[in-house]
Image (tube, rainbow, N blue to C red):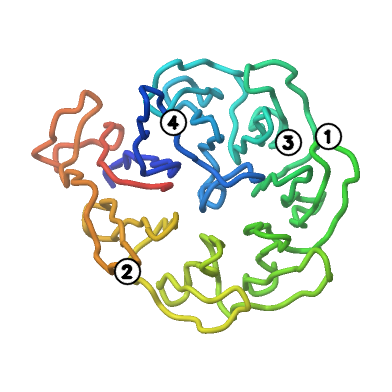
Amino acid sequence: MKRIFIGLIAIGILTLASCAVADETTIPPVVQADGYGYIAGNIGQGGLMAGDLKGSVYYRSESDHWALYTANLDGSEKVKLSDDRGSNINALGGWVYYTNFDDNFSIYKIRTDGSERQRIVEGYCSNLYVTGDRMYFDMRDESNMSHVYSVRTEGHDLKKIIPEAYMAYYYDDVVYYISYNGLNLWKLDIETDEKQKLTDNYSVYVVVDDTGICYWNVNEGTYNQMNLEGGEERTVLSGGDYYNKFNQYIYFIKSGQNYDLYALDLEIEIEDKLSSFSSEVFDENGKVISDLSSLSEDDFSFQERASFI
């Protein structure tokens, strides 16, 4: 069988508004909510990029062996912070938090200027959400089972809060998680310790804001929305993948249509196509391969597709 590699285009959702200009002073866009180290559903798609309230971004550089970088939103003032290969990136309070591939996905933090790098939690961690002075994440035990934990951002007061579960989101003192048994979506109220089951199906790409809870129903192939109490559920979209929601926009790709990027404006219910990827197959030099039957088992080839929105 001929090997065709897929060129995945990672799209980081940080802001859609251009910088406003008043009295010759550029006002940096807000790229995250105050008190949160993440935005929208970025962590649920690997956490390859985060932003701060000053308009800076922190990201994993695909062109430099996955090293951790910072830059302005326009790409200027790019600086390498660390050679660590990070994911689950959060930025809050002058620190960048991430899971370190080079240390078995332990949780690290580093100053936004690249100083004071330190390990916070040792272990195989993922789905890291930094909020206020605490972090919420899941970590595997010696039998490879994931459990949801909470810890202070200094690394103290580590607590297992939900056994046999994966962290899915954090919003307004509520932890959203996926149960290991059934892969259903649940929520835990931190103040009352009350748990509530929200779905009866396999649920991923969870995003929660003041408009409600959104998630991809994998079994049905639909992107659904419900209110914060878990009621009034409705199907918003179907036939896509890699869903992410920011303000009134839902971003996604359409399967079977060159995997292009689309946006749905929920306020006016209009869908826009944002990319036009080629359906051609390319060689390692970017030239179109017109005769796919000429490819051998060891030939390198790739196609364009969007992913990790």
Residue under pointer 4: 27
Give percent across and percent down for residue 148.
76, 56
Which of the pair 278/97 is nearer the observer?
97
Disc nearest the viewer among 1 and 2: 1
Residue under pointer 3: 107
Please identify the residue farthest to the bottom as the structure is shown: 232
Residue under pointer 2: 239
Query: Which circle's residue, 4 or 3, is located before the other in the chain?
Result: 4
Classify mark 2: residues with Cα within 10 Å, few (<14), some (14-19) or many (20+). few
User: Residue type at mark 2?
Assistant: Gly
Q: Residue at x 53, y 22 (%)?
A: 69
Disc nearest the viewer among 4 and 1: 4
Query: Which circle's residue, 1 or 2, is located before the other in the chain?
Result: 1
User: Residue type at mark 3?
Assistant: Ile
Instruction: Report whether 147 appears left or right of 89.
Output: right
Which of the pair 240/256 is nearer the observer?
240
Give percent across and percent down for residue 191.
82, 65
Q: CA distance from mark 4 to mark 3?
A: 32 Å
Q: Secondary structure at mark 3?
A: strand
Q: Secondary structure at mark 4?
A: strand
Q: CA distance from mark 1 to mark 2?
A: 43 Å
